[in-house]
Amino acid sequence: MSGAVDEEPSTGGVSAAWGLWLTGLALFAASLALFLIGIESAREIYFDETWYVPTARAWLKTGEMLRQEHPPLGKLLIALGMWIFGDNPLGWRAMSALFGAITIVASWLWGLALFRDTTRALWVAATAFFSAVVFVQARIAMLDIFLMAFTSLALAFFTFSVKEIYRPERAFRYALAMGACLGLAGACKWSGFFLALGLLAIRLLIGLMRLWKVRFADPRVEDFYSPEPSPAWTPAKTYLAFVVAPFAAYFVCYLPQMIHAGTISEFAASHRRMYEIMSGHSDTHPYMSLWYSWPAMLRPVWYLFEVPGHDSALWSTANPAAAIDGLANPVVVFAGEAAILWALARWIVRREMNAMIITVGFLSQYLPWAANPKGLEFFYYYFPSILCLSPALGLALFREGGLARNWPALSFLALAGAAFVYFLPILVAGIGVTPEAFAARMWFSTWR
């Protein structure tokens, strides 16, 4: 296929490296521009912005950290946007847009690490964009887009690390970068550590198989396991990557709180407060849903629905409502979930490394919600797992031999893009949705 990236080290790779940098920068700039268009359409704070914008406001004024049910990094990033751009719609959401663009680039990097092919990597990034979950979260001042950016980067760095067999030093640097990203993900929400458990499980599984001296009768290049030990993943280096680097990154995010409190003990005190809040009972919410319903997309969350004049009786074709629905693209989600099952089968039957990483990335960010003691869950908790659907689809749809043989992948991308455009009136407040357009997009009664 055109655009392939060699796995072998090469002496003439300087121009190729510059090409990758330019591609990444172009992808970042294009994504950021698209996320910023109309980001100020909602002039007032909405949904969970009513929690996090006042929290950022208070921190900028007094240094006090409110809303301590979550770690501080996401709230600090929202405050940074407000410090740069002001206490206005752009300031509230600027960092979300920035990290939305980083998430798209991270999806591209993960695709590049998995497939070693720039064309397929760009396809993965485009599918992630059309999934709509990054688009919606990149335009609202919530914590989830920061979590998604760091977990996506962690998956990319982990994959680069385990596939870097020629340069152990580089593989270890990738592993440390993965660890730092996992720590930063956890510093946005504790659920960011779910992925750390999944990736660590991969390392422990491979370590156990090496301890048992397992050998396959028919070893293949794409096997997830090789009996030869990797110098980049010694026990000491694994400890540094999965414990020291995440904790260091996580701890640093608490420095502003500790400085304001005047004591390092604020670190422990903050965690006691978080535990008390997260382990307590929660009230019900009209948009709450449980984890097992998320793959069927039964209950998306309406972030905003506002009729000009604030009277539902005025809603008409001439007076459309501003609507923002936390809805994923059903074309990407339903096809992607089938692709995850296909990836799981390929991991078990064919022992493929790519299939293993994608499957573990998806399941490790999804299944822990089954044990959530608080019980209050929302569909957007599923969004980090949805980002694993794009490479799963790439694994299922792409074939070797150039673009001519990959018309199924290109056709799917066109269909996903068309569905994304179709749902835009309920994803962007500035477009507006009429009663007729709204009814046409409510495919299930539970979407209302």
Image (cartoon, rainbow, N blue to C red):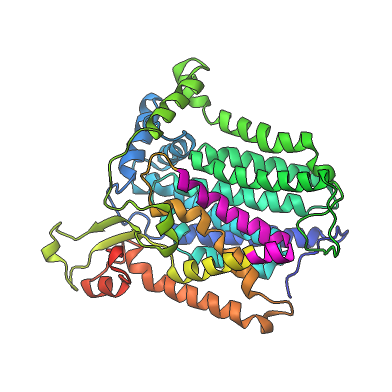
Describe residue 394's horizontal placement relative to residue 136 as left or right: right
Residue 318, quarter of picture: bottom left
Q: Is residue 112 visible?
A: no
Residue 342 placement (x, y as % from top left): 61, 68
Can residue 350 be found in the magenta stretch? yes
- Tell me which residue sits at (75%, 69%) in the image: 4
* Vertical placement of residue 320 versus 165, above or below: below
Residue 94 placement (x, y as % from top left): 43, 48
Describe residue 175's horizontal placement relative to residue 260 as left or right: right
- Tell me which residue sits at (76%, 65%) in the image: 5
- Tell me which residue sits at (47%, 55%) in the image: 383
Describe residue 276's horizontal placement relative to residue 342 as left or right: left
- Tell me which residue sits at (63%, 72%) in the image: 396
Between 390 and 100, the residue placed more toward the observer is 390
Q: Residue furthest top?
A: 263
Can residue 230 be found in the magenta stretch? no
* Vertical placement of residue 403 versus 390, above or below: below
* Vertical placement of residue 120 versus 229, above or below: below
Between 130 and 282, the residue placed more toward the observer is 282
Between 289 and 24, the residue placed more toward the observer is 289
Q: How many marks?
A: 0
Region rendered in magenta: 345-371
Magenta segment, principal secondary structure?
A: helix
Residue 169, quarter of picture: top right
**Image quadrant where one finds the C terminus:** bottom left
Describe residue 135's horizontal placement relative to residue 300 as left or right: right
Residue 319 placement (x, y as % from top left): 18, 68
Q: Is residue 236 visible?
A: yes
**Image quadrant where one finds the N terminus:** bottom right
Residue 160 placement (x, y as % from top left): 72, 53
